[in-house]
Amino acid sequence: MSSNTLSSQNQPSDSLTRSVAVDIKTGTAIPNRSPATAPRWLTRLTEPLSAVSEGLLILQLPNGDNLSFGADNGLVRATVKVNRWRALRRLLSGGTLSWSEGFVEGDWDSPNVAAVITWALANEDALTKLLAGSRISRFLSLFRHRRNANSKRGSRKNITFHYDLGNDFYRAWLDDTMTYSSALFTAPLQSLASAQATKYQNIIDELDIQDGSRVLEVGCGWGGFAEHLLQQRQVQLEGITLSHEQLAFARQRLEAAGYADTARFSLTDYRDTQGQYDHIVSIEMLEAVGQEYWDTYFKTLYQRLKPGGSAAVQVITIDEKRFRGYCESPDFIQTYIFPGGMLPSIERVQAHSGKAGLEWRGALAFGDSYARTLAEWNQRFHATWPSVSKQGFDERFRRLWRYYLEYCEGGFLAGSINVYQVFLRKPA
């Protein structure tokens, strides 16, 4: 599916023509006191923007001026309405992280944030210095990130930060399978729930899980994969999580489905698991492990597998050529959404799993499916916002999550991040 088709689906209702700067704390509109002429420092921004060539960016300034950069060549078209000049000053001083914070705080708006991200990534080479920010801003973000190290205690804190927002929150906008990971779409009109089932089924088929198997799920979420598997196979399944909310939901879900005797869930760190299994499944959990624990993670998979056993690891990856800069300057997701998180490249997944003694059986890439999954989540999130807001979430939270979902969608559309199902085997 083309990026234009995908990113134009069901956009949130934020309108550029009606957009005003809003004080996030009070919810009141901020009067526009912008000068009639643009500030002199604006040339520090317009000069690098003038060097871009991929796609078109329309920049609507607080004084009413409209500037355009790039070419309307059909690649991507993005529009940004700057509500306050400080949005651009923060971009110059703090790079992409400060720019992201500006959206959350109402400094700028766009009818399609994913298109803005896609445009920026398409022109990354020309915008490198502009997007990097100052050295001190990069140092401070790296310092904050390293404080979220994934020790056993840190992992519990980091997982709780994101996943214990409440089951009612996630239930409001996830599909009926309560799956919070990429679906695998195989048809243009396929529903999200059906594509999630396709993802689960591909794992079962690739691992060739048979009746009588012992299966460990590392990061069981709300029990979606467990229920799908037990509907088809008579296996003994153990699922682990660090989220109290997910644990309670998964236990209740599988008990209600009649699988209380064959599915067991516990609040357990992957490093504390015991025994050996025929198969291990870990869906989008590696991203939360942290780079310093990747070897430990794959060593644990090796130890928990029986000889000849197999594992499936679904993981979001970052392009290897971006990895070093990503390590040195934590991004918006690591700062505000998944503290302690770190995306590996697919090359590093292969290297670390091989170092642990696991054989590489193959991998399936489906980043286009993740872009579509995120677009559907974004649509659902905003459609249900009136009810979600009654759970105590404010306007700042709405903008934070809108930016998170579209930021990721833009990354997948641009190809800077991807998602894989990786299949591994422990030698017999």
Image (cartoon, helix red, strand yellow):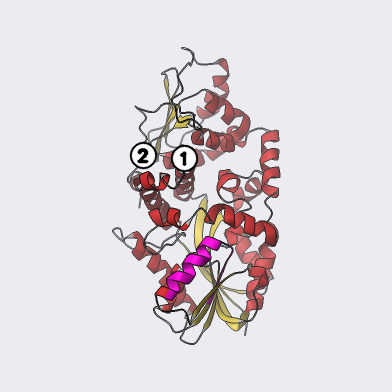
2 vs 1, front mark: 1
SS at circle 1: loop
Residue type, label 1: Asp
SS at circle 2: loop
Locate residue 329: give its quadrant: top right
Q: Position of residue 158 (x, y in %)?
A: 61, 54
- Of all residues, the one furthest to the bottom in this rendering is 212
Q: Is residue 242 magenta?
A: yes
Q: Which residue is mark 2?
A: 74
Write the residue at 49% across / 87% down: 212
Locate residue 272: give its quadrant: bottom right
Residue type, label 2: Gly
Work out whether residue 338 or residue 156 is closer to the camera in this orientation and state it: 156
Q: Position of residue 296 (x, y in %)?
A: 69, 67
Q: Which residue is mark 1?
A: 394
Q: Please say if 299 is above or below 324.
A: below
Write the residue at 36% across / 48% down: 384
Q: Please say if 349 is above or below 360.
A: above
Q: Quick check: 172 left or right of 331?
A: left
Is residue 334 in view?
Answer: yes
Q: Quick check: 79 left or right of 274?
A: left
Write the residue at 61% across / 63% down: 349
Q: Quadrant of the C terminus?
A: bottom right
Magenta range: 238-255
Locate residue 347: give its quadrant: bottom right
Q: Is residue 325 magenta?
A: no
Q: Main secondary structure of the magenta part?
A: helix
